[in-house]
Amino acid sequence: MAEVLVLVDHVDGAVRKPTLELLTLARRIGDPVAVALGSGAEATAGVLGEHGAVKVLTSDAPEFADYLVVPKVDALQAAFDAVSPAAVLVVSSAEGKEIAARLALRIGSGIITDATDLEAGDEGPVATQAVFAASYTTKSRVSKGVPVITVKPNSAPVEPAAAAGAVEALTVSFGESATGTKVVSRTARESTGRPELTEAAIVVSGGRGVNGAENFPLIEALADSLGAAVGASRAAVDAGWYPHTSQVGQTGKSVSPQLYIASGISGAIQHRAGMQTSKTIVAINKDAEAPIFELVDYGVIGDLFTVVPQLTDEINTRKG
Amino acid sequence: MSLRIVVCVKYVPDATGDRRFADDLTLDREDVDGLLSELDEYAVEQALQIADEADDAEITVVTVGPEDAKDALRKALSMGADKAVHVEDDDLHGTDVMGTSLVLAKAVEKTGYDLVICGMASTDGVMGVLPALLAERLGVPQVTLLSEVSVNDGVVTGRRDGDTATEQLEASLPAVVSVTDQSGEARYPSFKGIMAAKKKPVESLDLEDLELDADEVGLAGAWTAVDSATERPARTAGTIVKDEGEGGKQLAEFLAGQKFI
């Protein structure tokens, strides 16, 4: 069976969930061979093996942390040359997409980004994408070279599948361009203790209607009652009420959780682009005409300052 | 020495309008109003600010697109860019991101550059990979997705807010930069700017001018193929209740019924 390269997204050896989803998709096409780079690379092998990786190619050269993007492209290319895979899968993060694109160009392959599903097809893997603010669904494939495809988080279930997960050292020789952009300093984002926005099964978002940073704890309390991530609309972020890293929408994160709760968000196209593919959508808004109500499975027309705390209390009571 | 800044911009269908596919599954550009991609306005803005700080700078704005794409160039010129380059050729119809990056790389090289600035993504394709591809093709550093950027003594520095960390980046010019919508609000063109833009030079180039062959670009030259595009079915109408004092509890009941609680 053909091998499929999967670039591992991890933090110091802790594999992030979207990579395990990639392994599920990779197994539909072939035998997953993982590529783990940077500090803690070898530590990823255990969990990767449990989810279907037959091999884990590792390199912990300091270049991956010290310079932007290109060292990882060099390494992925080295893995590509060593394995001759049938496809290359990468998580659709900002960095993942940049790595994938540069690799695709180097190996003379087409690239598909932000796939939401992947199936084997007669002419190679077929990728599903949601386009034009998720108003269309397309099926595409790479028509030249070995398909390079980036996949959005939450696009596939995590499925245990025992495989060898054998660690092999990857030899990487860095090109001249690898050291072009220096990472002078890196400040890890402070953990909120909540799930990652793009990976969360439930997202609770606040918008203009939240009316101030001082009111966001209401949204956070609801999120915490459900074990959810917190999101914000562009209006709330532009007003400085919540950090940009939590922005859901066209210029922020695109999320596809099981449940999306929009509070005080009108549902402008910019926001819809980032959440329209959520499985169940719920909204609370005092404006009955708000376009968000066109999307909802359940909507409450009302003041979020009374509805949200009541909902939070009720959830906490039911959880006992 | 003058700092040569090239800003790459895209003319896109208005996202608030009804965006569609044409029969060949390319973007329908005929029946939809277009404009300068909002995310490219931030690139123009940062170019203007960097040029202000430099002793001497010239900003050239470049686009690849049909005749109407001149509107996007005019907008950038009215914001304050100095001149424009429009790559236009019938054979470009259906070009994918690989082809577009090739055409832009040729156009940027022909124009001459110290610093290329792009937006973080287009508002139609939204791939966000063109700046990285451009850097790969030009063989210069990529300093992308910056929320803050500055240029001093031939070095570009900036802040990149990633998923798990914030990074301070640094590279020597020439380089390719992309900026996010957090980099600073874009200015509105002034009346004076709009009038001045009408007299600013717009150079038209075709594939031959860039020494490119038709089969390297266009739909046939694309490295990806769209097999189908289906309009997403409208979501089935949900239940909407008016809060009469029990709205939160009703919502909890719905969530419990869906097994979320």
Image (cartoon, coloured by chain):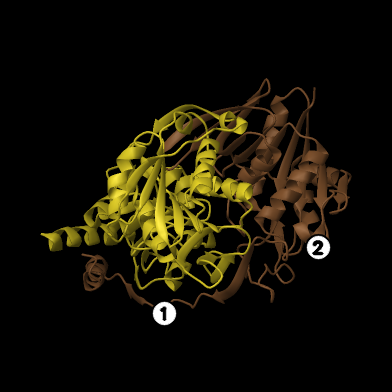
Residue B205 place in picture, x, y as percent = 86, 51
Label 1 and label 2 in one chain: yes
Q: Which chain is brown?
A: B
Q: Is residue A254 visible?
A: no
Could you tell me which chain the residue with mark 1 belongs to? Answer: B
Chain identifier, colour yellow? A
Q: In the image, what residue occupies the spot 52% across and 48% down? A: A80
Question: What residue did someone put label 1 on?
Answer: B236
Q: CA distance from mark 1 to mark 2?
A: 42 Å
Residue A181 as seen in the image, left or right of residue B56: left
Residue linked to disc 2: B91
Mark 1 / mark 2, whichever is N-terminal: 2
Q: Is residue A58 visible?
A: yes
Residue B1 position (above or below residue A236):
above
Name the quadrant of the N terminus of chain A.
bottom left
Residue A20: percent from left, percent from top: 35, 54
